[in-house]
Amino acid sequence: MTTNVHVASPLIAPDAESIRHADTVIQSINLPEQGIAVQDPATAETIAHVPDADVEAALEAVGKADSAGTDWAGSSLRQRADVLHAWYDKLIAHSEDLAHLISREMGKPLAEARGEVKYGTDFVRWYAEEAVRPAGNFRDTPDGGASLLTRRSPVGLAVLITPWNFPLAMATRKIAPALAAGCPVVIKPATLTPLTTYFAVQLAIEAGVPEDLIQVITTSKSGAFSEAVLLDPRVRKVSFTGSTPVGRQLLKLASQNVLRSSMELGGNAPLIVFNDADLQRAVEGTFAAKLRNGGQSCIGANRIYVQDGIADDFAVALTERFAQIAIGSGLGQQTGLGALIDDRAVAQMQAYTDNAVGLGASLLTGGHGYDSRGNFFAPTVLDHVAADSDVARSEIFGPIAAIQRFSTEDEALTRANATEFGLAGYVFTENIDRALNVADRLETGIVGINQGVPSNAGAPFGGIKQSGLGREGSAEGLEEYENIRFYNVARRTTS
Ligand SMILES: NC(=O)C1=CN([C@@H]2O[C@H](COP(=O)(O)OP(=O)(O)OC[C@H]3O[C@@H](n4cnc5c(N)ncnc54)[C@H](OP(=O)(O)O)[C@@H]3O)[C@@H](O)[C@H]2O)C=CC1
Ligand SMILES: O=C(O)CCCC(=O)O
């Protein structure tokens, strides 16, 4: 049962100058007067409207991207790299604009939005650099009768579907490798946070990206969009980041035309703290792995397993750290935790808390929402969480740290791996052997060792098990947009 406890404690108000800054950026984007309303999650105020495209408009966008794609596929690697470098420079020149916009539409604190701008622009720089280093090789067949020349070609028109939690980074992590590989794109950002994509793509065009090469589509009918677009024969690739149920639906659609598919889906990350961990490092790492983006990240620490000998000290220290955070508008000064994306998320956090406490967990801090038009939930620490609590079995996507305790390494690993998800895991220990052995045995695509934010533009981000298919970032992220082909060249025998 949900109690919906709301507390009247003062939340940090938005800074007027920062709001003005964000709204000036919004006014510079070419947007309609009507369409889908975009709201500031901290104030529930409508801040803009974006087009509500129908299927016809989406297919028109596919046609435009497809036409622009022919020249782009034939462009030299240096041309692609130059355009990406120019886009990177433009994004950097507008860093503060982007950060204010991200914070306004998504709710994260400005300092974190600045971090996202750095992370998101890094993908553009990384692929500008990678574009001119094509993979491929030349080797002889084992019997010496032929030579094999392997080459890469662009996979073709890519449909990119992005979530609301990292409005810039999720767009650039897909667009930049697609362009570097020679592909045109149609991108559909989340309706909750579409403005950053529109602005970043506007900057791409100003920087010299051919006008029709990147098409942005926003729609309130995402199901109809994917059914039409993914079945269009001009489309050859789909890349999605979001929930596992939607990923499964898209994979079904993609199977019709056997599209290349990259799926970055849900997580249920275990974070394991051993007795021999450095307490301070473990607390800071857990804080980051849990509260980055307000806990709204697919790699966020979900199940926190702490060994018996350190658990009491860890719980006290983490609680102190959580209790110190200032909550409020992302555009407020000193805000450490912003609004959640919508009111459903707030209700969900309350339900998780109540369910866990009902099953015996101790509530150490937080556990309530606020009397506010915005979507705020207090940073929450629960200890002695039962393994069958909802909070221990679901992807939390919010600011709740749910601590469970364990005795042995084997027990921790068995419990950590008892999930169908396999995106990220974390281990804290000062013993290098243990760290590497546990990392090897964790069934996840990503492991943070003694740190809580493993993501990097140069890393192959992605999951195993039902957390997804394919990788984003790094050289592997470029391969997702390439076909590998080989030529078998007959050799004369020289005798
Ligand atoms: N792996 C991750 O990074 C993320 C995981 N999640 C998880 O998913 C939960 C729900 O979040 P939510 O935003 O609803 O995630 P969704 O998976 O519903 O949405 C992600 C993106 O997919 C789009 N989408 C949804 N349905 C379809 C469809 N049938 N065809 C094409 N596109 C579609 C959304 O568009 P639209 O906005 O228009 O619905 C959005 O652009 C979260 O609480 C979290 O647990 C959420 C976001 C990111
Ligand atoms: O899917 C997400 O939640 C965004 C990825 C976070 C990251 O790249 O670190």
Image (tube, rainbow, N blue to C red):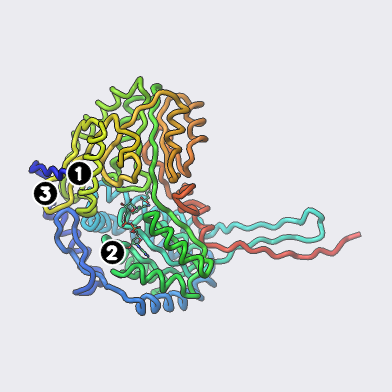
* Residue 131 % position (x, y): 51, 60
Task: Tell me where residue 477 appears, x and y as whole percent.
Answer: 49, 55
The residue that disc 3 covers is: 13
In the image, taking residue 103 as reference, residue 278 lies left or right, namely right
Q: CA distance from mark 2 to mark 1?
A: 30 Å
Q: Nearer the viewer, mark 2 or mark 1?
A: 1
* Gap between marks 2 and 3 measured at Cα: 25 Å
> Which amino acid type is shown beneath numbered disc 1?
Met
x, y percent for residue 492: 84, 64
Residue drawn at x 13%, y 42% as measured from the top left? 5
Tag shown at residue 1: 1
- Circle 1 packing at 10 Å, graded few (<14), some (14-19), many (20+), is few
The correct choice, above or below, for 463 with respect to 255 in the image is above
Indicate if the residue with disc 2 has its beta carbon within 8 Å of ligand 1: yes
Q: Which residue is mark 2?
A: 191
Q: Residue at x 16, y 63 (%)?
A: 46
- Above or below residue 64? Residue 328 is above
Give the vertical position of 396 relative to 230 (above or below): above
Q: Gap in Å between the C-alphas at discs 3 and 1?
A: 31 Å
Q: Amino acid at mark 3?
A: Ala
Location of the N terminus by quadrant is top left
- Percent from the top left, x then y, of residue 243? 37, 54
Residue 263 in sight: yes
